[in-house]
Image: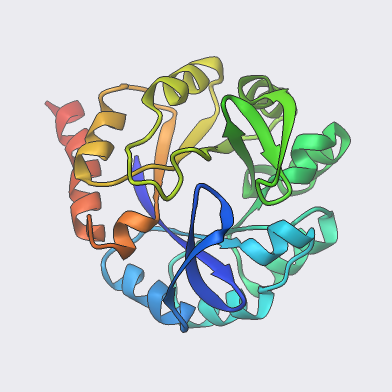
Amino acid sequence: MIPIPAIDLKDGRVVRLLQGDFKEETVYSEVPHEVAKGFEDDGAERIHIVDLDGALRGKPKNIKCVEEIIKRVKTPLQVGGGIRDIKSAKEYFNIGARWVILGTKACLDKGFLKEAVREFGDKAIIGIDARDGLVSTDGWTKVTDHKAIDLAREVEAAGGKTIIYTDISRDGALKGPSLKEIKILSLAVKIDVIASGGISAAHDILNLLTLKQKNITGVIIGKALYEKKITMKEALAACLSEKTTHAG
């Protein structure tokens, strides 16, 4: 498992929302590429980028900002937020993104899900954002009646290789991840799962490791890094304990 620092973009700035609420915004930087460079310098193996404006409006809005980050760092990026057609995904690949994260459209349209997986293979990551176990879409502003666990199985059946599972109630709340839900979801599929939401300190990463699910391959960390509850180096050390344990 690797720690993946998150950069959420809104109006070209680095922000964090509380539980996906656009009214609960904290601005952490006016210069996103400097934040990305800091994560890279601290050893990040990949960086998670979300275009919040894009997620809300249904098409990428901060692509120039993402492009500037890509120019400034060598660390591979996974980028999401408002990518709801093949063309938008290709635009991100063209500027150098390593992976694209497909959320709303992939969740609502099985045809698009299959097309994207066929087109991009393991470079397409499917973002499953859930509130009370039900999939949320459109920048987390709408809750569907679709169960997250069912969507995870559909992604696997379509040939998808990786999902990001976010419990919205934990996101930005620094209350720890939803261990029970993450375990249930990771047991339901064999594909890779990246856990997101709630990391507050190194012990939360260690708690994820105690689930002993080898397909939980990454954990996204956001607010805890910005609030200095944990450093990238501490997160890397916590994840490294997994390798030490397995080696023993």
Residue 189 vs 35, above or below: the answer is above
Residue 126, percent from left and from top: 65, 41
**Residue situated in front as seen by the camera: 148 or 90:** 148
Residue positioned 81% across, 36% down in the render: 108
The structure residue drawn at horizontal position 39% and vertical position 75%, both measured from the top left corner, is 35
Which residue lies at the image location 57% right of the left edge and 37% below the top edge?
A: 162
In the image shown, does 224 or 231 lie closer to the viewer? 224
| Above or below: residue 142 compared with residue 248 | below
Quick one: which residue is furthest to the right in this view? 111
Q: Position of residue 244 (x, y in %)?
A: 15, 35
Q: Quadrant of the C terminus?
A: top left
Q: Is residue 146 above or below residue 101?
A: above
Above or below for 85 versus 7: above
Q: Residue furthest left?
A: 248
Image side of residue 37 versus residue 109, left or right? left
Quarter location, residue 143 = top right
Residue at point 37%, 35% (across, down): 177
> Where in the figure is residue 1, as x and y percent of width and height?
34, 39
The count of marks equals: 0
44 left or right of 210 in image = right
Colour scheme shown: rainbow
Q: As drawn, is 181 to the left or to the right of 92?
A: left
Can you give x and y, in whole percent of width and height, for residue 50 in the image?
58, 60
